[in-house]
Image: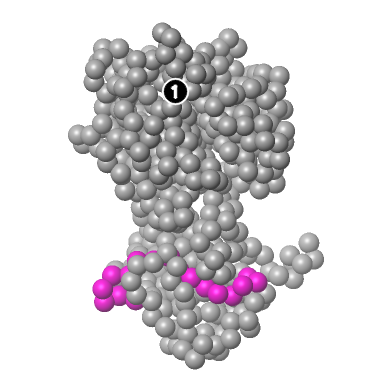
Amino acid sequence: MIKLLFLDYRQFERVDGFQRQLEPPRKHGAPLLASDQEPWERNLLQFYGSVLRRPDGIFQMWYSAGGFSQMKIGYAESEDGIAWRRPALGVMEWQGRKTNIVMDGCPIGATVIYDEREPRETWRYKMLCAPEPVTRISAFRSADGIHWTPAAENPVLGVHPDGPMGLLRQRDGRYAAYHRPGLGDRRVARSESWDFAHWSEPKVVVEPDQDDPTNVQFYGMGAILYGAYEIGTLWTYRTVASDMSWTKFFGGVMWPEFVHSRGGYAWHRTAQGVPWIPLSDEGFDRRQIRMASQPVLLPDEIRFYYAGCWKGHAYDGKAEQGEALWAISFAACKPDRFVSVTATSEGRILTRPFWTENPCFFVNAEVAPGGCIRAEITDVEAKPIPGFELENSLPIVGDSCYHRLGWKGAPEPSSLANREIRIRLEAKAAKLYSVFAGSEQEGRRYWDFDLPDCLPMKRVRKC
């Protein structure tokens, strides 16, 4: 499947009459877990951590519990990702009572993946964190996500993450980790590994630039593969102006920005300075939002789990015993609906040339009453291909992630396969999120796609 998103305009020749904007996900609202239920959490329950949905449908959550100097990794499970339970596991006890803690020893920055391509069952779950006594990034493995074993001669990276980390496995098999380049250095670096044991030296990939206010720092970043992209949530930390210390430790606020990359090193802040999930005015998440290390990709929606706090950075939970300081919830969007382009009157889009083996075309779009979208397939010179002209297009109306493009007379689409083509779209009172070529079945696996290769076919075949 070939897909074009509006994260930027690299795959488009012209975009006229449209307004591009970020489309923040909708908050679930009520907290799913709160930090006032278990005494060993010390009223501090947050992400650094991860949420996954394993192949059998069970949701799993790893979160940070306790204060910075007494941090532990807590575990929770759910059938639907909404009603969560903290199972009594027996890995760690508290005053003779079984708990849901799966790792003690201040494991900072925990991030977990379920590695479906891993043939060894006892290596299926992988985690990076920085436990005592070395407090440097270390690698762990597990068969169930509960019982963890060192996966290498730890530590595997000689840096203290001092914050959240991201972890993913790329298409070619490499592992990529996102972490801080050094203790207290609030920027984002990337390291890679082929075997999860030997990692490359950190290279900074995201840092504030000249368009950011002076009080902006990047606390960390989670990431996940999304087709040929990596998409992530960048923790943007805004420090207190009156804080003259170098660490800027107390009182700042935090929210995520949506970021994307095509190769993991050149990252783009998709809408710089605009919160992906904004702080609320009065809710539990009015001062801090800390994201799980990756979103959960479900058949009909994408969930971004987060921990929210109504106090600023580094607030001591011990002063608020009996009152939930932190809570975990999520915000969700439909597939591909990260960024939209909207035409209120008339808008026109022309793609750059590309080719596909499966010339069935779809758009992910919302069309308001009285509006429509029409499409045309052209050659590389932007001249209409007979049968696929704009005037023959069947109008698209309504709201769907899988609007199929069609033309009067049902021209044979096979003539469009494996040749250089463009798509021209005209829209009115419509909001577009993506365009893709492939079967509807492929479209339902919306996270599995390639980007158009805009090189001429003859040149690519020679390569």
**In front: 190, or 139?**
139
Q: Helix, strand or loop at disc 1?
A: loop
**311 drawn magenta:** no
Badge 1 crowding class, 10 Å Cα cut-off, few under 14, some 14 to 19, many 20 or more, is: some
Who's the residue at 33% across and 71% down the image? 398
Q: In the visual, does 191 lie left or right of 291?
A: right
- The residue pinned by badge 1 equals 88
- Quadrant of the rendering where the N terminus is positioned: bottom right
Who's the residue at 29% across and 21% down the image? 36
Q: Tell me, what colour scheme is on the image? A: one colour
| Residue 56 image offset from top left, x and y in percent | 53, 45
Name the residue at the left extreme. Answer: 282
Q: Is residue 26 visible?
A: yes
- Quadrant of the rendering where the C terminus is positioned: bottom right
Who's the residue at 46% across and 51% down the image? 298
- Report which quarter residue 94 is drawn in: top left
